[in-house]
Image: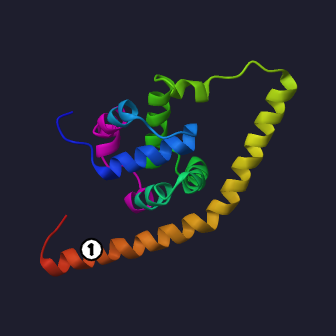
Amino acid sequence: MSEPITADVRAECRTLTLYLAGFAADELVTLSYARGLVSDAFTKAAGDASLDRALLSLARRGPFAAGLADAWARCFAPAGQLRRRLVLLVAILESTAPGYIAFEPAARGRFVAFVTLFTAGLGFVARLVVALPVVAIARRLESGRSHERATAEAGSGRTT
């Protein structure tokens, strides 16, 4: 990759890594993430671009907000940009140290596994309930920004 990694990509990678694994991304993870973002899966627009921008904008606000955006996207936009970026980052983290530790199952009994899964399920439902109005507001704000951009571009004579 010949281009330097932008501050936005660094911040996004850091925030999403904190959400997924509980620690900040190191340079190798950030570099791999930036390289992955230039693939066709991320550069070719598919789906609702304003929804993707709204979910990514929310997710970039911090690990908690990333969890809300992820819960919503898992149910309503599973093929969107946010989910693609999370899958990319999980793949990178699973194949690097110390990231793989966050995804390695601990050797525990069935009861502990059940409680862990049950707790994770309850956490997902709670995040989804909170995410419903939050994402609705984020979409509305992004829609307003998209309209403002289109108006500004029309006024300046540019087309996209």
Residue 160, x across and y down, in percent: 19, 64
Residue where numbered disc 1 is placed:
150
State whether residue 125 is above or below residue 57.
Answer: above
Residue at left offset 48%, top offset 41%: 24
* Residue 129 in view here: yes
The residue sitting at the top extreme is 107
Residue at left offset 41%, top offset 72%: 143
Task: Give left or right: position of 70 versus 14.
Answer: right
The residue sitting at the right extreme is 111
Residue 50, x across and y down, in percent: 40, 62
Q: Which residues are magenta?
A: 32-52
Residue at left offset 70%, top offset 60%: 129
Identify the image quadrant of the N terminus: top left
In-front residue for pair 66/141: 66
Q: Is residue 37 magenta?
A: yes
* Residue 80 in view here: no
